[in-house]
Image: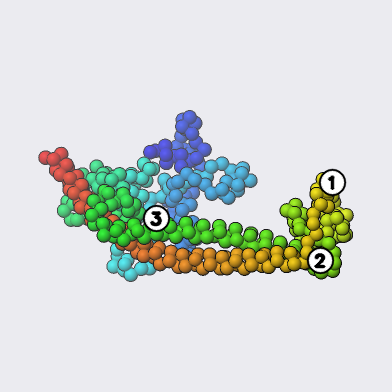
Amino acid sequence: MPYAKLKAVYPNITKASLKQYNVDELMADRRISALLGTRRVIRGDTGASFYKELQELIDSRDKIDPTEIRKRRTAEEGPRAAYWPLIKVVRIYVKHHILKDGLILDDMPGAHDSNPGRAKAAENYMKTCSGLFIVSPITRAVDDKSARSLLGERFRRQLKLDGGYLRNMVTFICSKTDDISISEATDALGLADVFEEIDDELNPLLGRIHYLEDEVKENKSKIDDLMHLSDTIEQDVDIWEDLSRRAATGEQVYEPTPRLKRLHTRAATADDRLRKRARPAIGMYTESDDDSVCGRQIVKDELDELDERIPLEQEQILRRLEALNARKKDVRQEKFETRGATDNAKLELQTLEARANQLTVAKRARCIRERNEYSTAAIKRDFAAGVRELDQELA
């Protein structure tokens, strides 16, 4: 503990180099000696600004803000000294009705602080208190740290000798009571039978919720597919309408092959820089002077195959357009119905999730209440066992 304090105040001193210093040399450090016997007043307009200033004086954690590290590197400074070993007490004055009768609340590090100096200071200061509030997370208070050890053996012995136990000066406060696992609490506290009625309603709800979530996900994927299909049909309609217009002028046109449909789509969606010119052998499909257009990609074998096709009649084109428009209508209707089913599923999901949340909250509240009651009895029982142990030792 002495070295921990010394290291905090003089961070550059190591155990190996400690023997090179004496008390006078350490006290010659004006940065430290100037602080001894002084009192510093801190005021803050906001809680955040006040907290920041206060932490620089009392914080013993060995961590540094990255911005502060960069500043030190620029200034070529060493590790920053901590002042907590030099501080006897910190008093914070707040105007509050709870304190109007002279009540003083002392926030101490705790009897089990990781820093031995702070733990010792807390243990000594507790001897002057008229009452103790021991705050601990509920799991730590019941499981990890039993009530008989939270105070420390020597201080419990002192309380016993001073009659502190008899004056009811010790109060345990369990925090984080809402931090709980429902499944673990149900098993540990034997609440399965208590929750049987709730689970009979909740489990089917959760199953239905899972089913609806999958349905919404599948419908979203289905709508994406329908959108893609709709775009493809629109492209086909554009192609056949163009064929119809060209056939109406007496030009020979042919049924587009899948490859030429792709070529046409690329050409149709290109900007005005693409220049088309008619080619009788392939009807409306043309080559482009632009290297980016696929006309030059058509090899001779494909052209020969195209030349063998039979020209389309206007009636054939109109029938194909009628079929495409009918298919487009069906796809539009299917998209409408799928969106409607998705909306209905989402509405049902909201209702079911709200009810499931109510039931889950009820289970959670019951688990918290049951654990609080169990913890209260366990802490009292464990603390009483600690008192009996002291009685036996004193006897």
Q: Secondary structure at mark 1?
A: helix
Q: At which x and y percent is residue 233?
A: 67, 62
In the image, residue 42 above or below residue 9: below
Q: Quadrant of residue 148?
A: top left
Query: In front: mark 1 or mark 2?
Result: 2
Colour option used: rainbow
Quadrant where the N terminus lies?
A: top left
State the separation of the CA atoms marked 2 and 3. Answer: 96 Å
Q: Which residue is mark 3?
A: 90
Q: At which x and y percent is residue 15?
A: 46, 32
Q: Which numbered marker is on residue 300?
A: 1
Q: Of the residues shown, which amino acid type is indicated by label 1? A: Lys
State the separation of the CA atoms marked 1 and 3. Answer: 94 Å
Q: Which numbered marker is on residue 247?
A: 2
**Left-right relation of 10 to 226:** left
Q: Secondary structure at mark 2?
A: helix
**Residue nearest the viewer, comparing 172 with 375:** 375
- Sequence order check: which comes first, mark 1 or mark 3? 3
Q: Quadrant of residue 207?
A: bottom left
Q: Residue placed at 60% from the left, 64% from the top?
A: 331
